[in-house]
Image (cartoon, rainbow, N blue to C red):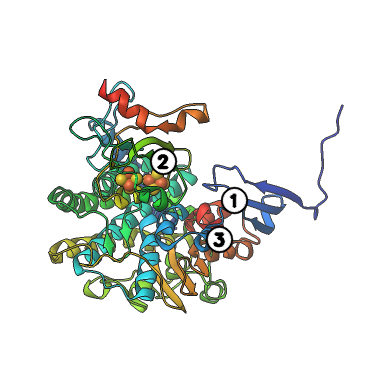
Amino acid sequence: MNSPILLQPDETFILNVGPQHPATHGVLRVKMEMNGEYIVNAETVIGYIHRMHEKMGELKTYPQFLMNLSRMDYLGALGYSHGHVLLVEKASGIVVPERAEYIRAIMVELNRVASHLFWFGAFVMDLGGFSPLMYALQDREHILDMLESVTGSRLTYCYFRFGGLCNDVDDNFIKAARQFIPRMRKSMKKYHKLVTGNIIFRKRLEGIAPLSKEMCRKYGASSAVARGSGINFDVRKNEPYSVYPEFDFDVPVYHECDSLARYMVRMDEIEQSLRIVEQGLDKLPGGPIMPDKKPKLIKPPVGDYYQAVETARGSFGIRLVSDGGKNPYRLKLRSPTYSNMHLFDEACQGMMIMDALAFMGSLDLVIPEIDR
Amino acid sequence: MVAYFTEIYTGLMSLFIGMGITFKEFFKPTVTVAYPYETLTMSSRYRGHIELVEDEEGNPQCVVCGLCEKACPSDCITLAGEKPEGGKKKVLTKYMLDFTKCSLCGSCVESCSFGAIDFSKEYNLASTKKEDFYFDLLKRLEERKK
Ligand code: SF4
Ligand code: SF4
């Protein structure tokens, strides 16, 4: 008979989470050194779906690269495209009509709500609750329908163009968006009752995985991860771009630093995004969606340019070094989850594995976006 | 001590509230459809793979300028044309789309100033063979004509 494997009191073992694992929502691998149920050390291993987006940026012309941005983060794609078009427009001095900027902001915010809804569902599912995912997807489907009716795609949009947009919104979209806002507000109440108030949910998040301000700064964390730790930073407010200064919205900040705080920030952000969409629809000016003279050949002058935007996952930065040619000399994509994820190694030391998985869910990781 | 029991009470209540919500949702009308027995109509801007647009006589409107080929970021489009004897304009002889690489970005459709290509509404395209995704758009146009 085989004798059972017995560990010495201080002996540790290695546990592999991923690369294919339901708790990581993608191909992320975490090598955990475990002492019983406690994590001694963890090492995140990335790169399983690296697709060389930066290199493609150098090899393709500017318009040809437009569609790549939405493949980085498939849940909140429009925010990334927004950063790219803003950067190239800034570099080559293209003026965007006001209507186009407003529509962009509305679309990005709707996409942010959709992304947060999916995160909400998946996060609760990580913790063992299945039905909230279904309710969240049902609401998200309304947003996707709206976005599809305008952009033609449901997930990987290629909608923004240098100088404006490829399609205008119609009355049906505006009507649908107006109907959606109260519906979503009602759903938010339901979610808070169903999930936020739930005792099991709270016990698994309250006081778990505290991230200090210093740690967030050290790793360059942004989005709800930083705002849940009391750092009041939102690119839309701190480095305003597009038409965001025209909107009246708040940046939710929580000081508890735990997983619940990160959850609450995102939930509050949905409401703030709805407010932006509402104001955007009210203020939506008429006029063209492309400049009168469509920019034909995009060749930004020699220089070094940078643009940061607040996407659903945090501060996304994109840097362009142009040598005056048809394609960029260098295109650097700063992905927010890349920074947010690297906290994990340090923060989960000494944590129980179940808490670590809940913590990972609260970081809202999208792996293709890390690997890009 | 009191706090302990209050927590048990509120905790239990929160579970019942949650149960109540799921119970209510249970009796709400179904929102999904039983695909493939039922299907939804695609929105008017839905992007399926591209398709050649014909003129009144059923011939392709394409003038073989090659702009779509150049605009495509993934080199999906291969086309060829020739001038017929005595004719002035080039006539399309080949239009191949490699849909395995297409990202449905729409650059080709936008780059065409003649309105000669458009998105189709097709989405039932599952297959186990790669070759099924190399579309001969000219042939498809001929078949449509019949
Ligand atoms: S939609 Fe985009 S990727 Fe597809 S064939 Fe047209 S240009 Fe190429
Ligand atoms: S751009 Fe239009 S006209 Fe020119 S080759 Fe392509 S389909 Fe034909």
Asked whether A283 or A261 is in front, the reply is: A283
Could you classify mark 2 by the number of other residues whose Cα lies within 10 Å: few (under 14), some (14-19), or many (20 or more)? some
Residue that carries the numbered disc 1 in the rendered image: A28
Query: What residue sits 53% from the left and 75% below the top?
Result: A217
Mark nearest the camera among 2 and 1 is 2
Query: What residue sits 39% from the left and 63% below the top?
Result: A311
> Which three-letter amino acid code belongs to the residue tagged 1?
Leu
Q: Which chain carries label 1?
A: A
In the displayed structure, would residue A228 be above or below residue A42?
below
In the displayed structure, would residue B32 be above or below residue A269?
above
Asked whether A190 or A360 is in front, the reply is: A360
Mark 3 and mark 2, same subunit?
Answer: no
Residue A213's x, y, as percent? 51, 75
Q: Do the residues labelled 1 and 3 touch (CB within 8 Å)?
A: no
Residue that carries the numbered disc 3 in the rendered image: A55
Residue that carries the numbered disc 2 in the rendered image: B79
Dot 3: element: helix
Residue A10's x, y, as percent? 80, 55
> Which three-letter amino acid code belongs to the residue tagged 3?
Lys
Dot 2: element: strand
Query: What residue sits 38% from the left and 70% below the top?
Result: A88
Is A86 left, or right, of A243 in this rendering?
right
Residue A201's x, y, as percent? 44, 50
Residue B24: which quarter of the image?
top left
Q: Is mark 2 within 8 Å of ligand 2?
A: yes
Could you classify mark 3 by the number of other residues whose Cα lies within 10 Å: few (under 14), some (14-19), or many (20 or more)? some
Asked whether B112 or B10 is in front, the reply is: B112
